Amino acid sequence: MKLAFLRPGELGAPAKHIYALLDYLKEKGVEIREYDLKERSPQEVVSELEEWRPLFLMDVNATGVIVGEREGKKYILSDLLGIVHLSFFVEDPLLFFPAFEGVEKPQNFIAFITDLKHTDSLNLLGISNVSYVSPFVNEKLFPEEEEKDIEIAFVGPVIDPQVIVNAVSQNYPQEIMPFFFETGEFMFRNPEVHVLTAFNYIYGLFNPQAQETFNKWREDNPSKFLRLLNDTVAYTTMRRKTYLLKFLEGMEVKILGEYQGNLFEGHEAIKVSSYEQLLKYYSSANLTIFVSPQSIPTGLSFVPLEAMYMGSAVMLDYKGTLPGFLKPEEEVITYAPLDRADLEEKVVFYMENRDALKEIGEKGKQAVRERFKVNDRGEFVYNILKDIERQYSQAGTQN
């Protein structure tokens, strides 16, 4: 079985975890070759693939999709070659919609998602073959633990929502902006809703004239509509982050990553120059607070798993699906996303009860090491590959 892994240069976080899956497939006997699309031209890669003739292409977040043309129409490469393209989406596929713009509906494309709501995004993009794989970690990525010298770490980036509003308002007509604001506020109040669900609900509340104006704009600007949805998700995520940081004012908080806006009292923004440095900061933190991005409305992000693996007690917003992944208040601390008192009281409690905080950090690390390995996920993917290989073999025999 041959598989070509296509990547746009060095993989960033959290896509790096996909290498654990590639290692697993190699152990199962899959022959894998990597192709860096940043260093090599697509034409050169295509020529080599045509000669090598793998049955599968694989990438992360559709960043390895190559588009070709036949009879005046554009197709993804796997459809042109009659093979299968597998893409792992560790983030919302809607963020990567340009990969499918102007392309005939992909036929030989399988999307693996880590949030069930991402199915909605894929359906909008014309992708119907979807499988769910829960998050896993690549243990080879993690360095040795550091001494704990950070009281509270807050996972960035953090951008003042007004900065986003100022940028977004320059890109869309004035009559479109109410849809942006109302959809964003609806998601802010309902953190587990997908942006398409939120937009469709809000759209129905506008009067017929406003709907007609929006429909005309959307028909003339299909790409801008998808960008509007992504901008709304970004706005909502940053709105929630700054909302929660305000309640931590006066506490010693280190914000890890980019920060745009005025810092609250006691807060410090720390620049992160590398992924390994970020992991070490997690290790140095007694408590790491994480706000789930609106682009992952119901699933579990890879980020808290990384912090837990590095031995930090993690505090994240509660979701109805969370108990299916982790044990709240035992392996991870949770807070109600919009409840100021819940957040403040729990932070103060655990800062004063270090033994309880340490115990959650230890149990969380153990949980990730035991239950978030690649093994069962890798076996699931491998069985899918074997099944497809068998189908192709039977089709070839019949022909």
Image (spheres, rainbow, N blue to C red):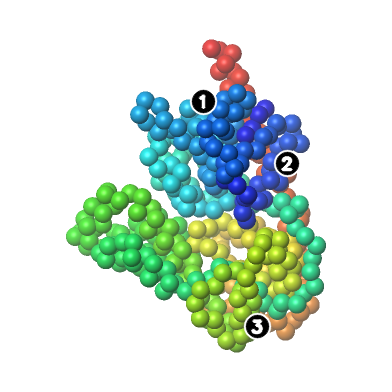
Neighbor class of circle 2 (other Cα within 10 Å; few <14, some 14-19, many 20+) is some
CA gap between label 2 and label 3 equals: 41 Å
- Give the number of the disc on residue 23: 2
Instruction: Tell me which numbered mark, 1 or 2, is placed earlier along the sequence.
Output: 2
- Nearer the observer, 245 or 331: 245
Whether residue 148 is visible: yes
Q: Is residue 11 left or right of residue 198?
A: right
**346 vs 223: above or below:** below
Q: Secondary structure at mark 2?
A: helix
Badge 3 is on which residue?
252
Is label 1 in a helix, a strand or a loop? loop
Q: Residue at x 38, y 70 (%)?
A: 166
Q: What separation in Å lies between label 1 and label 2 (alpha carbons)?
A: 26 Å
Task: Locate residue 6, reporting x and y percent.
Answer: 59, 39
Sooner in the amino-acid sequence: mark 2 or mark 3: 2
Q: Few, some or many C-alpha atoms within 10 Å of disc 1 (few <14, some 14-19, many ≥20)?
A: few
Quarter holding the N terminus is top right
Q: Earlier in the sequence, mark 3 or mark 1?
A: 1
Q: Is residue 191 left or right of residue 376?
A: left
Name the one closer to the observer, 349 or 1. Answer: 1
| Residue identified by numbered label 1 | 82
* Residue ID at (69%, 41%): 22
x, y percentage for residue 272? 64, 67
The amino acid sitting under disc 3 is Glu
Give the structural element (helix, strand or loop) at label 3: loop
Residue 338 is at least partly visible in this image = no
